[in-house]
Image: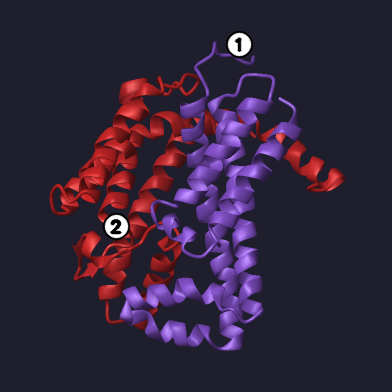
Chain colours: A red, B purple
Amino acid sequence: MQLSSRRLYLLSLCLVVLWLGLIEWAPFLLSLPSSDAKGVAFFIYWFFSPACHQLKESSFIIYGNQMAVCSRCFGIYLGMMLGVLFYPLIRSFDFSRVVHRRYIMLASLPMVGDVALLAVEAYPPLLWLKALTGMFFGFALPFYVLPALYQMLGRWSNFKSLATLIQTRGLS
Amino acid sequence: MNKEFYLKAALIGGCVAGFLSVIPIVNWLNIICCLWVLVGGVVAVYILNTSAPGPVTYGDGAMVGMLAGLIGGVLSGVIKLLLNIAGFGAGMVALEQLADRFPQFEEYLGMARTATVGAGMMIVGLFFTIIIFAIFGTLGGVIGTAIFVKKKKEPPAQA
């Protein structure tokens, strides 16, 4: 199975929009009086719980409830969505080449710096700053992840072979 | 590239992600964007890069990271499930913490304590864990490739 680069792009965009949508729908659903909506919100918060501490004081509040992830995680995912959106403008649909690794290192510096400065209590925690520094990192990620996924799907046949290998040889 | 290299790297990375995600106190670091799962993906790429003879591409990194995440997710989920069955309640910890943060969900925690609903929720929790671990394992694999693999000349495009 080999997706065309445009289809992979659209699929990735849909997934990242859905991911971000879930994060924002959870507080909206929780604000509704319906118990069904509350049940769906519970599953969304639960889904994101392994990936984020979900502390109220570190999260943006919308519809009177906190988002499903903290402000930094939200910034990373928002940055990822922006990165996917801007990818064709910066790199066209060329997934065969990956940008130099220095850019992801540079993009992570503001976030790492913010974490380090917060650890030494250089300034009080600021939600917008956490989100903004996370956004830089998130914006850079699609420029590595999209080509990686494109190459990975090209090797899908290898994956199927791997499944056969596990079946025949076991995991030892 | 030989698939056995993938398997070895993914197993080691998966064990790192899986075991570090269930060790008490240590597993708290998973709340930072699934840190141990990202580390598992990075470790898998490191192993692949040091053991495989050929060049490791971002596609290889993503693949081995995803496999490590899947293995780690299954490992961590199954260990929690077994601890829960053994009466240590490890599988309930996540739900209890969720109910602490969101008092509105207290009733769901009560439902989860009943045998039938609890078993179902354990399976749903295992499913969530595997999905999240696979996604973050893939990200870890990509980040690991950016860290460890020096840019080499791209192989010629396939016709």
Q: Where does the image place residue A149, in percent across and percent down from the top left? A: 52, 34
> Viewer-proximal residue, A26 or B11?
B11
Which dot marks residue B156? 1
Q: Residue at the spot x=63%, y=50% of the render? A: B15
Q: Is residue A142 visible?
A: yes
Q: Quadrant of residue B68?
A: top right
Residue B2, above or below A111? above
Q: Is residue B62 positioned above or below A39 on the image? A: above
Q: Quadrant of residue A51?
A: bottom left
Label 2: state its secondary structure. loop
Q: Which quadrant is home to the N terminus of chain A?
A: top right
Q: Is residue A74 left or right of residue B29?
A: left
Determine the residue located farthest toward the right in the rendered image: A168
Residue at 31 percent across and 63 percent down: it is: A25
Dot 2, crowdedness within 10 Å: few (<14), some or many (≥20)?
A: many
Q: Chain of mark 1?
A: B
Q: In front: mark 2 or mark 1?
A: 2
Residue neighbourhood size for the residue with mark 1, other residues' Cα within 10 Å, grouped as few (<14), some (14–19), many (≥20): few
Residue depicted at x 59% and y 55%:
B18
Evaluate whether residue A2 shows in this view. Answer: no
Number of callouts: 2
Tell whether label 1 touches label 2 (CB within 8 Å).
no
Q: Say what secondary structure mark 1 lies in.
A: loop
Pointer 2 residue: A70
Rendered location of residue B39, percent (x, y): 50, 44
Q: Quick check: A64 left or right of A137?
A: left
Label 2: chain letter = A
